[in-house]
Amino acid sequence: MIQINNVCKSFLTPEGKLDVLKNVSLSIKDGSCMVIGGENGSGKSMLMSIIAGLEAADSGSVECGGKTGLVFQEAETQILGETPREDIAFGPKNLGLNKQQVAQAVEDALAKTGLAAKADAPSRFLSGGEKRRLAIACMIAMNLPVIILDEPYANLDYTGVKQVNALIKLLKADGKTILILTHEIEKCLGLADDFTVLFRGEIVFSGKPEDALQQNLEQWNIRNPLNSYRELKDLVWE
Ligand SMILES: Nc1ncnc2c1ncn2[C@@H]1O[C@H](COP(=O)(O)OP(=O)(O)OP(=O)(O)O)[C@@H](O)[C@H]1O
Ligand SMILES: [Mg+2]
């Protein structure tokens, strides 16, 4: 469904040419869930912008078979409506659904994301986790075949992470093609069919999640999720 071929993107900065994406090629199968991991600045958000057509690649091509829904890293920036109900209705309205279909899609998305009680409260008063769920609710209501989530766990607590993962599972069960871009792979690798590591704009690993766990992930500045905590002295990242 998504085929990325030799995508390059660079910027001219005062310090010289910055290669943000270097010859990135990737394919994401219909109905699969791909996790792309990578440290801060590795090019994940840029890749999402190029897949979604928000940014143009300098060279290379992107083929995306279906309409793509995006959940941005800063979910609050994509909230436009005064209330969750209004916000969720935008997409289905724009897709040309009739009034009854829009109302049905909104109710369904509110219920699935646990936002029904906040449906008519001002969106700006929602918590960070609720705003993230609202952004996902908008995607659910549009019923798009491809959903890309950029850092869907940013700022979320344990419950927030579990709620987002429950929604990702729901989207998976619905047959959606899902792309998760995150540096927090320990929160979602178990949901992935395929896993890719971006490091300084390059793909350095692409394969099965179980095979990634056998790699030295630290060389790409990723903490191996299998490093467990057993006692107090383990409870510090250093
Ligand atoms: N418009 C731009 N001009 C110059 N550099 C840019 C521009 N947009 C992005 N970059 C650079 O591209 C690199 C990759 O940025 P990107 O936001 O894709 O990283 P990321 O992997 O999403 O990081 P994070 O985990 O922090 O969200 C960074 O070094 C960033 O500074
Ligand atoms: Mg990013």
Image (cartoon, grey):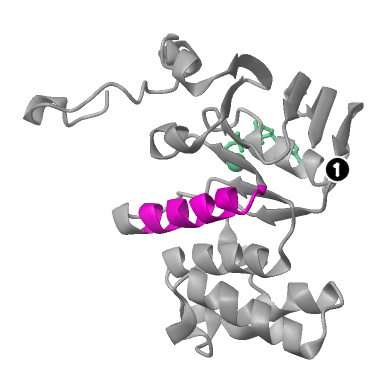
Q: Is residue 57 magenta?
A: no
Quadrant of picture, ligand 1: top right
Residue located farthest toward the left when viewing the structure as drawn: 232
Q: Is residue 176 left or right of residue 98?
A: left
- Quarter of the figure with the C terminus: top left
Q: Write the residue at 45% across / 19% down.
A: 210
Callout 1 crowding tier (Cα within 10 Å): few <14, some 14–19, many ≥20: few
Q: Is residue 105 left or right of residue 151?
A: right
Magenta-highlighted residues:
160-176
Q: In this rendering, does residue 16 appear at all?
A: no
Q: Position of residue 168 (x, y in %)?
A: 52, 51
| Main SS of residues in magenta | helix
Above or below — where is 161 with respect to 35? below
Q: Position of residue 18 (x, y in %)?
A: 74, 23
Q: Mark 1 is on which residue type?
A: Gly
Q: Which residue is disc 1 drawn over?
A: 65
Above or below — where is 71 with respect to 183? below
